[in-house]
Image: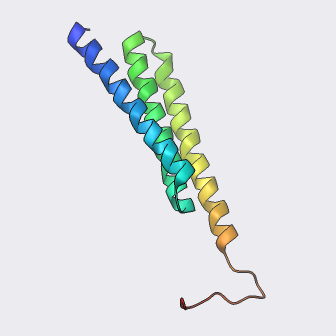
């Protein structure tokens, strides 16, 4: 690997770290639960990308397996959280859901 690619990948990791900070802020300050879910999903994607870049930089092939497993677990977590959110926001049996906003 040439020196240029090494520097380029380290800069890319720095940019990914900044994006992760933005996602953390969105997850904490997000006005809606959906915003928080999207931020968590984006964080798992960015962490997986970071692990893949580190795998290339460090020449450690097993890290790509770790990134793949982490991505699958992140996807599963978002699916479970979305299902829990849908069940929580579902109206009760005795109450009728509002049809309009007053």
Residue under the point 55% across and 32% down: 69
Image coloring type: rainbow
Q: How many marks are shown on the rendered structure? A: 0
Who is closer to the viewer here, 101 or 90? 101
Q: Where is residue 79 in the image (x, y as percent from the top left)?
A: 58, 54
Whether residue 2 is visible: no
Who is closer to the viewer here, 24 or 3? 24
Q: Position of residue 81 (x, y in %)?
A: 63, 55
Specify the quadrant that holds the C terminus.
bottom right
Residue under the point 21% across and 12% down: 4
Q: In this view, does 49 lie above or below 2?
A: below
Q: In which quarter of the image is residue 2?
A: top left
Q: Position of residue 89 (x, y in %)?
A: 65, 72
Whether residue 46 is visible: yes
Looking at the image, the residue that sits furthest to the right is 94
Who is closer to the viewer here, 64 or 8? 8
Q: Where is residue 93 in the image (x, y as percent from the top left)?
A: 76, 84
Q: Is residue 60 above or below residue 69?
A: above
Q: Quadrant of residue 33?
A: bottom right
Q: In this view, does 7 lie above or below 78?
A: above
Specify the quadrant that holds the N terminus.
top left
Residue under the point 74% across and 88% down: 95
Horizontal relation, residue 84 to residue 61: left or right: right
Horizontal relation, residue 3 to residue 59: left or right: left
């Amino acid at each position: 690997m040439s020196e240029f690619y090494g520097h380029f990948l380290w800069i890319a990791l720095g940019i990914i770290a900044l994006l992760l900070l933005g996602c953390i802020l969105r997850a904490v300050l997000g006005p809606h639960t959906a915003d928080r879910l999207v931020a968590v999903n984006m964080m798992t994607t960015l962490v997986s990308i970071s692990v893949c870049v580190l795998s290339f930089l460090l020449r450690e092939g097993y890290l790509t397996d770790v990134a793949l497993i982490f991505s699958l677990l992140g996807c599963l977590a978002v699916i479970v959280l979305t299902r829990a959110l849908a069940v929580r926001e579902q109206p009760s049996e005795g109450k009728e859901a509002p049809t309009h906003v007053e």
